[in-house]
Image: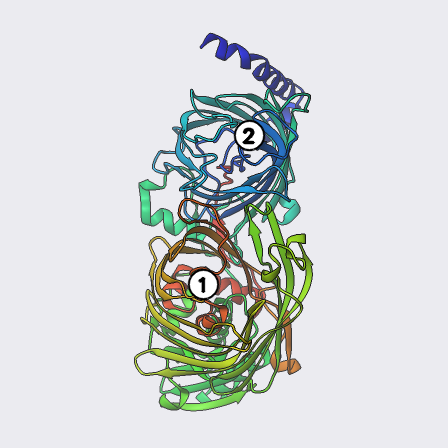
Amino acid sequence: MKSFIQKTSKTFLAITLGAVCGIHNVHAEDMANIKSIKVDTDVNVQGFGGLINVPTANAIQFGELHWSYATLTDNGSYRNGTSDGLYQDGNVLSLTASPFPGFEATIRNSGGDFDTGSDLQANLKYQATFIPKEWFSLAAGYQDVGGITNHLDSIFVAASKDWRNFRFTVGTGEFRSTIGGTAKRYEGGFYGIQYQPFEWLQLQAENDGVNNAAAIKFKTPKSWLANQAQVYGSIITGDYDAGTGNDKVFYQVGIRANLFQGLDSGLDEQNYETQKLADSFGWFLSDRDYGTYTPKHIDFTQSQHYDDNVVAMTKLKDALADHGFENVWVGARDTQILVRVENSLYNRNQMDAIGVVLGMAASQLPGYFTNLDFTLSRYEIPTLRLNVNMQELVNFYEGKTLDPQFVALTPKDRSAVTADWLGGDNTPWFTPRVKFYPILPNFIGTEIGQADINLSIRSNIHMPLWKGAEVSADYDIKISQSSDFDLGGALWKYRQPTGLKNLFLRQTYQLPYNIYVAGSVGVAKQQYNEEHNVATFQAGWQSLDGRHRLSYHYAYLDSRLANRPNRYVYTAQYRHFLPVLDISMYAEAGQFWRGDRGYTLGLSTHLGDSLLSVWMSETDVSIKGIGFTIPLGTRKNMSVAEHGYQVRMGERWSYGLGTSSYKGTNQIFVNRAYRPGYLAQMQGRYFDFDRLSLAYIEQNLPRLRDAYAKYGKDGISGKYEKESNGG
């Protein structure tokens, strides 16, 4: 033990002296600011919240996404020939997210060269959130979960304690991989120290159980990127066995981003969603301050004019139509007001449209209306219907109550609702809508190469024709591709060339008992040698509160190419939304696109306009993966009603990484447990990517006021009493 301590003393002494000198030279008036700075948790080289190789017991912040690249790489089985030691100057790519407080999920890819093989790993870490933040932090982690090659199979436990600008970490673990040529980290214990004197600087020193190392990390101030992201970079050195005559200096760069887009929060800040979790779980979430939401006053005044029904209805109808909503109808029945609109303005999240419409109704309608019946439709197919007491709605927008107590009703056609109606303004028929978004087929961590990508830009144009009907087309423009996608390359048949991808005519109907069905016919070109005439059928049912959803998907694909197979897809899915955790759980089973039969299980959670998901599938291949979806473009788009057409960015972009196993090998498998996008149109286009429900709205109520304040009337969105937290 004595020698173990002696071999790290010089490193720790240098870091400590530097820290002491830094403090000594700071002016007294700056000391208060230094003491208030907390130690940030960023992702380390191994893909965990930590130092260099050492993991800390602190998880990254709930709702954060980290992408990092590092050159410190295990030699293992994927060598680039530059080192005869345990480490090499290679490439490590990590994608880490926190889908729930205390949890980290990581997909990590390490290799010696981008043009040769690499290893794809899945990591998990949990911080014990029930331990009060004043005590210490405790966490356990598993690296290379379920890996077939098991290059880095290891487990660990770690404890950390923050004191002022310092964080101290100790831990132990077991390196269980049997692959030779790899440093057996964690075994025999590990420890480290972090010191962060400024927001933009952190010093680190560690022993990972094998090597001593130190790093200096530079970070951009959070204010530079509107408190939504940080860029950081580290210079690393240590007594690593990097091979004869090789330099022992490495580096890491990363991006730390806040996924709570659409909410009034930033990095290290809490919001309404985190506060609701803290209220629900109480003592179980004691690891940090989760904040208290207080609705802030916005410039909201209810109309004091007691116009008759026709005048009041006309004013509201004209205001909604002038704002840019389509198919606007306003009706009255005694003291009840009925509002029906279609939304093409707020495509990132339909919550914004709902918040603007309800806010405008609450502010403009006279006080003698006692009840509001609101329906949101798409091409005259009603998809959401809410009923609310008008005074409760006014109190909600005035900030007097947090919940206006919406009641979900079965959506109905306007002709089935008895009322005195005015409207029909801004009909959507034959108005083209175009959107653009990236397409990125990729192969990560294969025996062919560490990262092969094929980037294209897809343009989607669709046009509503009549009730429930639309025509849609997708056209891809190739931007760039790796050499393996070139003609004759190993991945050539999976490339996405410039050209027409899909062309469909779709028809959607609403049936009794809240059942929706949709059918389509068209042409789809999936990849090389896969071009089909396609007929599809989709059916879905959702409970009124949105917690339960059943769906069925069927497609017949008739090959347009000689001697190529026809394909059949038929799957059934059940999704359950658990509000207390804000998590959707789903299971899908059947026959998928490639003819493989089996099932998929998954969990997903919305963080503002972002989505995090983990899944596993069992068909002829086992696949485990992590994915994320981020919003694109702006919350409000150009008005179709004003211009007669619309051009915008796509609503969102999704990316996922999965690792597969088959009979003990890491082969490449494409489109397993895969249901094409044209079999998800009803859920996406008509039900806002499975967010159009009372359960989702109740989880995100402040967004209604935020949307009205930003777009319905000048004002300021909700305020959070929060404490900056570097956890």
Q: Nearer the viewer, residue 596 or 329?
A: 596
* Disc 1: CA contacts within 10 A as few (<14), some (14-19) or many (>=20): some
Is 463 above or below relative to 398?
below
Amino acid at the residue labelled 2: Ile
**Is residue 540 visible in the rendered structure shown here?**
yes
Q: Residue at coordinates 51% horizontally, 66% vertically from top-left?
A: 349
Between 265 and 607, the residue placed more toward the observer is: 607
Element at badge 1? Answer: loop
Percent coordinates x, y for residue 627 in the rendering: 48, 53
Q: Position of residue 238 (x, y in %)?
A: 60, 22
How is the rendered protein coloured?
rainbow
Contact, CB < 8 Å: mark 2 with mark 1? no
The circle on residue 674 is 1
Position above or below: 426 against 131: below
Of 409 and 551, the residue lying toward us = 551
Q: Could you tell me how far apart the alpha carbons at marks 2 and 1 are, in whole angstroms?
A: 37 Å
State the residue lying farthest toward the front: 563
Residue 201 visible in rendering: no
- Label 2 vs label 1, nearer the camera: 1
Q: Is residue 139 left or right of residue 267?
A: left
SS class, disc 2: loop
- The residue carrying pointer 2 sits among few (fewer than 14), some (14 to 19) or many (20 or more) residues within 10 Å by Cα, namely many
Q: Quadrant of residue 370?
A: bottom left
Q: What number of labels is visible? A: 2
At x 58%, y 61%, the residue is 494
Q: Amino acid at mark 1?
A: Tyr
Circle 2 sits on which residue?
A: 52
> Residue 365, position in %: x, y?
46, 79
